[in-house]
Image: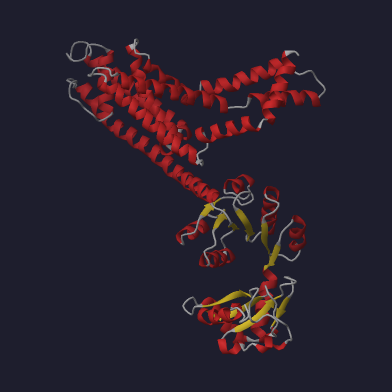
Amino acid sequence: MNMKNFLVSVSYYLEASKSYNKTKKFTYNILENHSSTYKKIFDFFMIFLVLSTIAILIYEVNHIKLPLLDSYETFAIMIFIIEWLGRLWVSSDIHRTILNDYEHAQVLDKAFDLNRSIKSIIKTKADFIFSPMSIIDLLAILPYYRPLRILRIFLLFRLFKILRYTNSLKQFTIVFKERKFELYTLAILYVMVVFFGATIMFIYEGSGANDKIHGFFDAVYWSIITISTVGYGDVTPVTVEGKLVTLVLIISGFLVIAFGTSIITTGLAERMENIKEERVEAEAAKMDNFTIICGFGVMGRVLAGELNKINNKFIIIDINEENIKKAKSRGFLAIRGDATNMHLLEEIGINTGAVNIIALTNDDAVNLSIILSAKTLNPNINIIARANATASIAKFEIAGVTKVMSANEISSYVAAEYIGQPVAFEAIDDILLNDEAGACVDEIEVLDNSKNIGKKVKDIDISKYNLSLIGIIDSNDRKNFIFNPLNSDYEIKQKDIFIVIGYAASIAELKIDLISKSLEG
Protein backbone atom coordinates (compact mmCIF):
# COMPACT_ATOMS: atom_id res chain seq x y z
CA MET A 1 0.00 0.00 0.00
CA ASN A 2 1.46 3.35 -1.01
CA MET A 3 1.46 6.45 1.16
CA LYS A 4 -1.62 8.01 -0.49
CA ASN A 5 -3.80 4.96 0.04
CA PHE A 6 -2.52 4.54 3.58
CA LEU A 7 -3.36 8.12 4.57
CA VAL A 8 -6.78 7.95 2.91
CA SER A 9 -7.52 4.69 4.74
CA VAL A 10 -6.43 6.15 8.06
CA SER A 11 -8.53 9.26 7.39
CA TYR A 12 -11.64 7.17 6.71
CA TYR A 13 -10.95 5.17 9.86
CA LEU A 14 -10.71 8.34 11.97
CA GLU A 15 -13.84 9.78 10.35
CA ALA A 16 -15.81 6.66 11.30
CA SER A 17 -14.24 6.22 14.75
CA LYS A 18 -16.72 7.19 17.46
CA SER A 19 -14.10 7.18 20.20
CA TYR A 20 -11.77 9.49 18.23
CA ASN A 21 -14.52 11.97 17.39
CA LYS A 22 -15.89 11.85 20.93
CA THR A 23 -12.44 12.53 22.39
CA LYS A 24 -11.80 15.39 20.00
CA LYS A 25 -15.20 16.92 20.69
CA PHE A 26 -14.60 16.64 24.42
CA THR A 27 -11.20 18.32 24.01
CA TYR A 28 -12.76 21.08 21.92
CA ASN A 29 -15.49 21.67 24.52
CA ILE A 30 -12.90 22.02 27.28
CA LEU A 31 -10.63 24.37 25.35
CA GLU A 32 -12.87 26.37 23.01
CA ASN A 33 -16.60 25.91 23.70
CA HIS A 34 -17.61 28.79 26.00
CA SER A 35 -21.06 27.31 26.62
CA SER A 36 -19.58 24.09 27.99
CA THR A 37 -19.59 23.56 31.76
CA TYR A 38 -16.29 21.69 31.46
CA LYS A 39 -14.61 24.75 29.97
CA LYS A 40 -15.65 26.95 32.88
CA ILE A 41 -14.10 24.49 35.34
CA PHE A 42 -10.98 24.22 33.18
CA ASP A 43 -10.70 28.02 32.94
CA PHE A 44 -10.79 28.44 36.72
CA PHE A 45 -8.18 25.70 37.07
CA MET A 46 -5.87 27.32 34.51
CA ILE A 47 -6.22 30.79 36.06
CA PHE A 48 -5.22 29.31 39.42
CA LEU A 49 -2.31 27.48 37.80
CA VAL A 50 -1.04 30.64 36.07
CA LEU A 51 -1.27 32.83 39.17
CA SER A 52 0.26 30.21 41.47
CA THR A 53 3.27 29.63 39.18
CA ILE A 54 3.86 33.38 38.95
CA ALA A 55 3.69 33.59 42.75
CA ILE A 56 6.26 30.80 43.00
CA LEU A 57 8.67 32.52 40.59
CA ILE A 58 8.32 35.80 42.51
CA TYR A 59 8.82 33.99 45.84
CA GLU A 60 12.04 32.36 44.61
CA VAL A 61 13.64 35.73 43.81
CA ASN A 62 14.61 36.27 47.47
CA HIS A 63 14.12 32.77 48.87
CA ILE A 64 15.71 29.35 48.55
CA LYS A 65 14.21 27.20 45.83
CA LEU A 66 12.13 24.43 47.40
CA PRO A 67 11.98 21.01 45.68
CA LEU A 68 8.21 20.78 46.23
CA LEU A 69 7.60 24.10 44.50
CA ASP A 70 9.93 23.09 41.69
CA SER A 71 7.92 19.89 41.16
CA TYR A 72 4.68 21.89 41.19
CA GLU A 73 5.98 24.21 38.49
CA THR A 74 7.09 21.22 36.42
CA PHE A 75 3.55 19.88 36.69
CA ALA A 76 2.14 23.26 35.63
CA ILE A 77 4.46 23.50 32.63
CA MET A 78 3.39 20.02 31.53
CA ILE A 79 -0.24 21.14 31.71
CA PHE A 80 0.62 24.24 29.64
CA ILE A 81 2.32 22.07 27.01
CA ILE A 82 -0.56 19.57 26.88
CA GLU A 83 -3.03 22.45 26.58
CA TRP A 84 -1.10 23.97 23.66
CA LEU A 85 -0.91 20.59 21.90
CA GLY A 86 -4.64 20.12 22.45
CA ARG A 87 -5.41 23.50 20.89
CA LEU A 88 -3.14 22.62 17.97
CA TRP A 89 -5.05 19.35 17.55
CA VAL A 90 -8.55 20.86 17.53
CA SER A 91 -7.56 23.91 15.43
CA SER A 92 -8.30 21.86 12.29
CA ASP A 93 -9.11 18.31 11.13
CA ILE A 94 -6.22 16.81 9.18
CA HIS A 95 -8.13 13.70 8.15
CA ARG A 96 -11.08 15.73 6.84
CA THR A 97 -8.76 17.87 4.73
CA ILE A 98 -7.34 14.71 3.13
CA LEU A 99 -10.81 13.20 2.62
CA ASN A 100 -12.24 16.39 1.10
CA ASP A 101 -9.38 16.64 -1.37
CA TYR A 102 -9.55 12.90 -2.15
CA GLU A 103 -13.31 12.87 -2.72
CA HIS A 104 -13.11 16.07 -4.76
CA ALA A 105 -10.51 14.39 -6.99
CA GLN A 106 -12.73 11.32 -7.32
CA VAL A 107 -15.71 13.41 -8.44
CA LEU A 108 -13.62 15.22 -11.06
CA ASP A 109 -11.96 11.95 -12.08
CA LYS A 110 -8.50 13.33 -11.37
CA ALA A 111 -5.46 11.98 -9.59
CA PHE A 112 -5.39 12.70 -5.86
CA ASP A 113 -2.67 15.28 -5.12
CA LEU A 114 -1.38 14.43 -1.64
CA ASN A 115 1.18 17.24 -1.71
CA ARG A 116 -1.61 19.79 -2.06
CA SER A 117 -3.38 18.36 0.97
CA ILE A 118 -0.18 18.41 3.02
CA LYS A 119 0.46 22.05 2.09
CA SER A 120 -3.07 22.97 3.11
CA ILE A 121 -2.67 21.14 6.42
CA ILE A 122 0.69 22.80 7.14
CA LYS A 123 -0.74 26.23 6.33
CA THR A 124 -3.71 25.74 8.63
CA LYS A 125 -1.56 24.51 11.51
CA ALA A 126 0.99 27.28 10.91
CA ASP A 127 -1.77 29.88 11.11
CA PHE A 128 -2.56 28.60 14.58
CA ILE A 129 1.08 28.28 15.70
CA PHE A 130 1.90 31.86 14.72
CA SER A 131 -1.35 33.34 16.02
CA PRO A 132 -0.88 35.88 18.87
CA MET A 133 -2.42 33.69 21.58
CA SER A 134 -0.41 30.64 20.51
CA ILE A 135 2.82 32.65 20.68
CA ILE A 136 1.83 33.86 24.15
CA ASP A 137 1.27 30.24 25.23
CA LEU A 138 4.72 29.24 23.97
CA LEU A 139 6.48 32.22 25.54
CA ALA A 140 4.74 31.46 28.84
CA ILE A 141 6.57 28.12 28.94
CA LEU A 142 10.07 29.59 28.47
CA PRO A 143 10.61 30.97 32.03
CA TYR A 144 10.81 27.37 33.23
CA TYR A 145 14.27 27.07 31.65
CA ARG A 146 16.14 28.54 34.63
CA PRO A 147 19.76 28.52 33.29
CA LEU A 148 18.81 31.40 30.95
CA ARG A 149 17.71 34.01 33.50
CA ILE A 150 16.95 36.46 30.70
CA LEU A 151 14.00 34.25 29.79
CA ARG A 152 12.32 35.21 33.06
CA ILE A 153 11.16 38.37 31.33
CA PHE A 154 8.66 36.12 29.59
CA LEU A 155 7.09 35.50 32.98
CA LEU A 156 4.71 38.33 32.10
CA PHE A 157 3.33 36.30 29.21
CA ARG A 158 1.79 33.90 31.70
CA LEU A 159 -0.41 36.77 32.80
CA PHE A 160 -1.45 37.28 29.18
CA LYS A 161 -2.57 33.63 29.16
CA ILE A 162 -5.40 34.66 31.48
CA LEU A 163 -6.92 36.39 28.45
CA ARG A 164 -7.80 32.90 27.19
CA TYR A 165 -9.76 32.01 30.30
CA THR A 166 -11.61 35.25 31.09
CA ASN A 167 -14.20 36.17 28.51
CA SER A 168 -14.49 39.75 29.80
CA LEU A 169 -10.80 40.49 29.18
CA LYS A 170 -11.05 38.75 25.83
CA GLN A 171 -13.86 41.12 24.86
CA PHE A 172 -11.55 44.02 25.72
CA THR A 173 -8.95 42.76 23.25
CA ILE A 174 -11.68 42.39 20.62
CA VAL A 175 -12.42 46.10 21.02
CA PHE A 176 -8.81 46.89 20.09
CA LYS A 177 -9.12 44.71 16.98
CA GLU A 178 -12.39 46.31 15.93
CA ARG A 179 -11.02 49.83 16.48
CA LYS A 180 -7.58 49.24 15.06
CA PHE A 181 -7.95 51.88 12.32
CA GLU A 182 -8.83 54.60 14.85
CA LEU A 183 -6.11 53.39 17.21
CA TYR A 184 -3.51 53.33 14.40
CA THR A 185 -4.48 56.89 13.51
CA LEU A 186 -4.16 57.90 17.15
CA ALA A 187 -0.76 56.18 17.42
CA ILE A 188 0.54 57.98 14.31
CA LEU A 189 -0.71 61.29 15.69
CA TYR A 190 0.95 60.55 19.03
CA VAL A 191 4.31 59.68 17.41
CA MET A 192 4.19 62.82 15.28
CA VAL A 193 3.53 65.07 18.29
CA VAL A 194 6.26 63.37 20.34
CA PHE A 195 8.77 63.64 17.50
CA PHE A 196 7.83 67.28 16.86
CA GLY A 197 8.25 68.24 20.53
CA ALA A 198 11.49 66.26 20.93
CA THR A 199 12.99 67.80 17.79
CA ILE A 200 12.21 71.39 18.85
CA MET A 201 13.50 70.71 22.36
CA PHE A 202 16.72 69.17 21.09
CA ILE A 203 17.38 71.97 18.57
CA TYR A 204 16.96 74.78 21.11
CA GLU A 205 18.19 73.16 24.31
CA GLY A 206 20.34 70.25 23.23
CA SER A 207 23.31 72.38 22.28
CA GLY A 208 24.32 73.06 25.87
CA ALA A 209 21.50 75.42 26.89
CA ASN A 210 19.98 72.72 29.07
CA ASP A 211 22.33 70.50 31.08
CA LYS A 212 19.60 67.81 31.27
CA ILE A 213 19.47 67.31 27.49
CA HIS A 214 22.56 65.34 26.44
CA GLY A 215 21.12 63.62 23.40
CA PHE A 216 18.04 63.21 21.26
CA PHE A 217 16.83 60.35 23.49
CA ASP A 218 16.64 62.75 26.44
CA ALA A 219 14.48 65.07 24.32
CA VAL A 220 12.19 62.15 23.35
CA TYR A 221 11.97 61.10 27.01
CA TRP A 222 10.98 64.64 28.03
CA SER A 223 8.43 64.85 25.21
CA ILE A 224 6.71 61.56 26.17
CA ILE A 225 6.62 62.46 29.87
CA THR A 226 5.15 65.89 29.06
CA ILE A 227 2.50 64.72 26.55
CA SER A 228 1.35 62.00 28.94
CA THR A 229 0.76 64.77 31.55
CA VAL A 230 2.90 62.86 34.08
CA GLY A 231 5.55 65.57 34.43
CA TYR A 232 8.27 64.11 36.68
CA GLY A 233 10.11 67.43 36.65
CA ASP A 234 13.56 65.85 36.20
CA VAL A 235 13.84 67.54 32.76
CA THR A 236 12.46 71.06 32.39
CA PRO A 237 12.80 73.61 29.56
CA VAL A 238 14.93 76.70 30.18
CA THR A 239 14.47 78.56 26.90
CA VAL A 240 11.40 80.45 25.70
CA GLU A 241 11.08 78.14 22.70
CA GLY A 242 11.22 75.09 24.98
CA LYS A 243 8.52 76.48 27.25
CA LEU A 244 6.24 77.23 24.27
CA VAL A 245 6.69 73.68 23.02
CA THR A 246 5.82 72.43 26.51
CA LEU A 247 2.51 74.30 26.40
CA VAL A 248 1.75 72.83 22.98
CA LEU A 249 2.56 69.30 24.19
CA ILE A 250 0.41 69.65 27.31
CA ILE A 251 -2.61 70.71 25.25
CA SER A 252 -1.89 67.98 22.67
CA GLY A 253 -1.61 65.45 25.47
CA PHE A 254 -5.12 66.24 26.72
CA LEU A 255 -6.47 65.93 23.17
CA VAL A 256 -4.71 62.61 22.55
CA ILE A 257 -5.91 61.16 25.86
CA ALA A 258 -9.48 62.39 25.23
CA PHE A 259 -9.43 60.95 21.71
CA GLY A 260 -8.10 57.60 22.91
CA THR A 261 -10.59 57.43 25.78
CA SER A 262 -13.44 58.18 23.38
CA ILE A 263 -12.35 55.38 21.01
CA ILE A 264 -12.13 52.78 23.78
CA THR A 265 -15.34 53.88 25.52
CA THR A 266 -17.36 53.82 22.29
CA GLY A 267 -15.94 50.42 21.36
CA LEU A 268 -16.72 48.96 24.78
CA ALA A 269 -20.27 50.36 24.73
CA GLU A 270 -20.95 48.73 21.36
CA ARG A 271 -19.29 45.52 22.48
CA MET A 272 -21.41 45.36 25.62
CA GLU A 273 -24.53 45.00 23.49
CA ASN A 274 -22.95 42.02 21.73
CA ILE A 275 -21.97 40.52 25.08
CA LYS A 276 -25.54 40.86 26.37
CA GLU A 277 -26.93 39.17 23.23
CA GLU A 278 -24.39 36.35 23.54
CA ARG A 279 -25.44 35.83 27.15
CA VAL A 280 -29.10 35.67 26.13
CA GLU A 281 -28.23 33.10 23.45
CA ALA A 282 -26.25 31.06 25.97
CA GLU A 283 -29.11 31.22 28.49
CA ALA A 284 -31.63 30.16 25.84
CA ALA A 285 -29.41 27.29 24.73
CA LYS A 286 -29.59 25.87 28.27
CA MET A 287 -33.42 25.91 28.40
CA ASP A 288 -35.66 23.01 27.47
CA ASN A 289 -39.34 22.83 26.46
CA PHE A 290 -39.49 26.51 25.61
CA THR A 291 -41.21 28.60 22.95
CA ILE A 292 -39.62 30.98 20.48
CA ILE A 293 -41.76 34.07 19.83
CA CYS A 294 -40.78 35.87 16.63
CA GLY A 295 -42.08 39.42 16.78
CA PHE A 296 -43.03 41.51 19.80
CA GLY A 297 -45.87 43.55 18.37
CA VAL A 298 -49.34 43.69 19.92
CA MET A 299 -49.99 39.95 19.47
CA GLY A 300 -46.50 39.07 20.66
CA ARG A 301 -46.93 41.13 23.84
CA VAL A 302 -50.26 39.52 24.67
CA LEU A 303 -48.90 36.02 24.01
CA ALA A 304 -45.74 36.64 26.06
CA GLY A 305 -47.85 37.97 28.92
CA GLU A 306 -50.09 34.89 28.92
CA LEU A 307 -47.16 32.47 28.72
CA ASN A 308 -45.49 34.31 31.56
CA LYS A 309 -48.63 33.97 33.70
CA ILE A 310 -48.62 30.18 33.37
CA ASN A 311 -44.81 29.99 33.83
CA ASN A 312 -44.10 28.72 30.33
CA LYS A 313 -40.52 29.38 29.25
CA PHE A 314 -40.02 31.47 26.11
CA ILE A 315 -37.58 33.74 24.31
CA ILE A 316 -38.48 36.69 22.11
CA ILE A 317 -36.74 37.55 18.83
CA ASP A 318 -37.41 40.90 17.18
CA ILE A 319 -35.34 42.99 14.80
CA ASN A 320 -36.79 46.21 16.20
CA GLU A 321 -34.64 47.60 19.01
CA GLU A 322 -37.54 49.43 20.67
CA ASN A 323 -39.59 46.24 20.86
CA ILE A 324 -36.66 44.42 22.49
CA LYS A 325 -36.32 47.21 25.05
CA LYS A 326 -40.03 46.86 25.87
CA ALA A 327 -39.66 43.09 26.24
CA LYS A 328 -36.64 43.42 28.54
CA SER A 329 -38.38 46.10 30.60
CA ARG A 330 -41.04 43.48 31.40
CA GLY A 331 -38.36 41.03 32.47
CA PHE A 332 -38.68 38.79 29.41
CA LEU A 333 -35.76 36.98 27.81
CA ALA A 334 -35.31 38.77 24.48
CA ILE A 335 -32.70 39.13 21.77
CA ARG A 336 -32.48 41.59 18.92
CA GLY A 337 -32.00 39.76 15.65
CA ASP A 338 -33.44 38.43 12.44
CA ALA A 339 -35.73 35.47 13.19
CA THR A 340 -35.18 34.14 9.65
CA ASN A 341 -31.45 33.74 10.37
CA MET A 342 -30.87 30.01 10.71
CA HIS A 343 -27.60 30.50 12.60
CA LEU A 344 -29.38 32.61 15.23
CA LEU A 345 -32.13 30.01 15.59
CA GLU A 346 -29.50 27.31 16.05
CA GLU A 347 -27.65 29.40 18.65
CA ILE A 348 -30.76 29.75 20.83
CA GLY A 349 -31.54 26.03 20.59
CA ILE A 350 -34.29 25.50 18.03
CA ASN A 351 -33.06 21.95 17.43
CA THR A 352 -32.32 21.19 21.08
CA GLY A 353 -34.67 22.64 23.70
CA ALA A 354 -37.34 24.51 21.69
CA VAL A 355 -40.72 22.82 21.22
CA ASN A 356 -42.70 25.68 19.67
CA ILE A 357 -41.91 28.59 17.38
CA ILE A 358 -44.52 31.27 16.76
CA ALA A 359 -44.15 33.74 13.87
CA LEU A 360 -46.10 36.90 14.70
CA THR A 361 -44.57 39.57 12.49
CA ASN A 362 -46.82 41.76 10.35
CA ASP A 363 -45.04 40.64 7.17
CA ASP A 364 -46.20 37.33 5.66
CA ALA A 365 -42.98 36.97 3.66
CA VAL A 366 -40.97 37.13 6.88
CA ASN A 367 -43.30 34.68 8.61
CA LEU A 368 -42.95 32.28 5.68
CA SER A 369 -39.15 32.51 5.89
CA ILE A 370 -39.33 31.77 9.62
CA ILE A 371 -41.47 28.69 8.92
CA LEU A 372 -39.05 27.38 6.28
CA SER A 373 -35.99 28.03 8.46
CA ALA A 374 -37.57 26.38 11.50
CA LYS A 375 -38.76 23.37 9.48
CA THR A 376 -35.30 22.92 7.98
CA LEU A 377 -33.53 23.00 11.34
CA ASN A 378 -36.11 20.98 13.30
CA PRO A 379 -38.74 19.09 11.26
CA ASN A 380 -40.57 18.03 14.44
CA ILE A 381 -41.01 21.45 16.00
CA ASN A 382 -44.52 22.83 16.46
CA ILE A 383 -44.89 25.92 14.21
CA ILE A 384 -47.64 28.52 14.63
CA ALA A 385 -47.77 31.47 12.26
CA ARG A 386 -49.81 34.61 11.82
CA ALA A 387 -51.24 35.11 8.33
CA ASN A 388 -51.92 38.77 7.63
CA ALA A 389 -53.43 37.99 4.23
CA THR A 390 -55.83 35.12 3.50
CA ALA A 391 -53.85 34.23 0.37
CA SER A 392 -50.82 33.40 2.57
CA ILE A 393 -52.56 30.61 4.46
CA ALA A 394 -52.11 28.04 1.67
CA LYS A 395 -48.42 28.96 1.35
CA PHE A 396 -47.91 28.52 5.08
CA GLU A 397 -49.56 25.10 5.03
CA ILE A 398 -47.39 23.97 2.11
CA ALA A 399 -44.30 25.17 4.01
CA GLY A 400 -45.23 22.87 6.90
CA VAL A 401 -46.87 25.13 9.48
CA THR A 402 -48.72 23.34 12.28
CA LYS A 403 -51.35 26.01 12.87
CA VAL A 404 -52.19 29.23 11.02
CA MET A 405 -53.77 32.23 12.75
CA SER A 406 -55.51 34.60 10.36
CA ALA A 407 -55.50 38.10 11.76
CA ASN A 408 -58.37 39.11 9.47
CA GLU A 409 -60.56 36.15 10.46
CA ILE A 410 -59.93 36.73 14.16
CA SER A 411 -60.90 40.38 13.80
CA SER A 412 -64.05 39.40 11.84
CA TYR A 413 -65.15 36.88 14.48
CA VAL A 414 -64.63 39.44 17.23
CA ALA A 415 -66.61 42.09 15.32
CA ALA A 416 -69.44 39.66 14.56
CA GLU A 417 -69.62 38.58 18.20
CA TYR A 418 -69.75 42.18 19.35
CA ILE A 419 -72.56 43.07 16.89
CA GLY A 420 -74.59 39.98 17.74
CA GLN A 421 -74.20 40.03 21.53
CA PRO A 422 -72.53 43.25 22.62
CA VAL A 423 -73.44 42.88 26.30
CA ALA A 424 -72.07 39.35 26.53
CA PHE A 425 -69.02 40.37 24.57
CA GLU A 426 -68.27 43.25 26.93
CA ALA A 427 -68.75 40.99 29.94
CA ILE A 428 -66.39 38.30 28.66
CA ASP A 429 -63.89 40.91 27.52
CA ASP A 430 -63.95 42.48 30.97
CA ILE A 431 -63.45 39.11 32.64
CA LEU A 432 -60.50 38.14 30.47
CA LEU A 433 -58.70 41.48 30.42
CA ASN A 434 -59.25 42.60 33.99
CA ASP A 435 -56.32 41.10 35.88
CA GLU A 436 -57.76 42.17 39.24
CA ALA A 437 -60.95 40.19 38.68
CA GLY A 438 -59.08 36.89 38.83
CA ALA A 439 -61.25 35.27 36.12
CA CYS A 440 -59.74 33.00 33.50
CA VAL A 441 -60.33 30.31 30.90
CA ASP A 442 -59.24 26.85 32.01
CA GLU A 443 -59.40 23.23 30.89
CA ILE A 444 -60.32 20.30 33.12
CA GLU A 445 -59.58 16.70 32.15
CA VAL A 446 -61.87 13.91 33.33
CA LEU A 447 -59.80 11.26 35.10
CA ASP A 448 -60.09 7.53 34.37
CA ASN A 449 -61.99 6.69 37.54
CA SER A 450 -64.12 9.83 37.85
CA LYS A 451 -67.61 9.32 39.24
CA ASN A 452 -69.02 11.41 36.37
CA ILE A 453 -68.02 9.00 33.58
CA GLY A 454 -71.15 7.80 31.78
CA LYS A 455 -73.28 10.73 32.93
CA LYS A 456 -74.81 13.19 30.51
CA VAL A 457 -73.49 16.74 30.63
CA LYS A 458 -76.99 18.19 30.99
CA ASP A 459 -77.42 16.18 34.20
CA ILE A 460 -74.60 18.13 35.85
CA ASP A 461 -75.77 21.40 37.37
CA ILE A 462 -73.07 23.71 36.02
CA SER A 463 -74.98 26.83 37.09
CA LYS A 464 -74.30 26.18 40.76
CA TYR A 465 -70.58 26.77 40.13
CA ASN A 466 -71.24 30.30 38.83
CA LEU A 467 -69.25 29.75 35.63
CA SER A 468 -69.81 29.00 31.95
CA LEU A 469 -69.07 25.76 30.11
CA ILE A 470 -67.80 26.77 26.68
CA GLY A 471 -67.43 23.28 25.28
CA ILE A 472 -65.95 19.79 25.55
CA ILE A 473 -63.09 18.24 23.60
CA ASP A 474 -64.00 14.63 22.77
CA SER A 475 -61.37 12.18 24.04
CA ASN A 476 -62.00 9.87 21.06
CA ASP A 477 -61.50 12.65 18.52
CA ARG A 478 -59.47 15.63 19.69
CA LYS A 479 -60.56 17.61 16.64
CA ASN A 480 -64.20 17.22 17.68
CA PHE A 481 -65.14 20.21 19.83
CA ILE A 482 -68.69 20.11 21.24
CA PHE A 483 -69.71 23.72 21.62
CA ASN A 484 -72.28 24.59 24.33
CA PRO A 485 -72.95 20.94 25.26
CA LEU A 486 -75.39 21.65 28.12
CA ASN A 487 -78.41 21.12 25.87
CA SER A 488 -77.08 17.91 24.30
CA ASP A 489 -77.18 14.27 25.30
CA TYR A 490 -73.38 14.01 25.26
CA GLU A 491 -72.11 11.41 27.70
CA ILE A 492 -68.93 12.13 29.64
CA LYS A 493 -66.00 9.81 28.91
CA GLN A 494 -62.62 9.45 30.49
CA LYS A 495 -59.97 11.87 29.12
CA ASP A 496 -62.65 14.34 27.95
CA ILE A 497 -61.57 17.94 28.44
CA PHE A 498 -63.99 20.58 29.73
CA ILE A 499 -63.30 24.17 28.60
CA VAL A 500 -64.75 26.59 31.15
CA ILE A 501 -64.65 30.31 31.83
CA GLY A 502 -65.11 31.94 35.21
CA TYR A 503 -63.39 32.78 38.45
CA ALA A 504 -60.55 30.65 39.77
CA ALA A 505 -62.44 29.59 42.91
CA SER A 506 -65.47 28.44 40.89
CA ILE A 507 -63.29 26.49 38.46
CA ALA A 508 -61.56 24.80 41.39
CA GLU A 509 -64.94 23.59 42.75
CA LEU A 510 -65.97 22.12 39.38
CA LYS A 511 -62.54 20.56 38.95
CA ILE A 512 -62.85 18.76 42.29
CA ASP A 513 -66.30 17.46 41.34
CA LEU A 514 -65.29 16.30 37.86
CA ILE A 515 -62.07 14.51 38.85
CA SER A 516 -63.33 13.07 42.14
CA LYS A 517 -63.32 9.28 42.22
CA SER A 518 -66.40 7.08 42.19
CA LEU A 519 -67.47 5.43 45.43
CA GLU A 520 -66.67 2.03 43.98
CA GLY A 521 -63.07 3.24 43.17
Position of the N terminus, as image quadrant, is top right
Residue 460 position (above or below residue 21): below
Residue 398 visible in this rendered orientation of the protein: yes
Q: Is residue 404 left or right of residue 296?
A: right
| Image position, residue 498 (x, y; %) | 64, 77
| Image position, residue 509 (x, y; %) | 54, 82
Position of the C terminus, as image quadrant, is bottom right
Residue in front for this viewpoint, 230 or 346: 346
The colour scheme used here is secondary structure
| Image position, residue 142 (x, y; %) | 40, 17
Residue 451 position (above or below residue 34): below
Q: Residue furthest front?
A: 520
Q: Residue furthest right?
A: 109
Q: Is residue 45 left or right of residue 9?
A: left
| Image position, residue 196 (x, y; %) | 32, 21
Residue 131 visible in this rendered orientation of the protein: no
Residue 329 position (above or below residue 97): below
Residue in front for this viewpoint, 290 or 109: 290
Q: Is residue 267 left or right of residue 516?
A: left
Quadrant in the rendering for residue 470: bottom right
Q: Is residue 300 left or right of residue 406?
A: left
Residue at image location 69% in from the left, 59% down from the top:
364
Quadrant in the rendering for residue 203: top left
Residue at image location 50% in from the left, 49% down from the top:
283
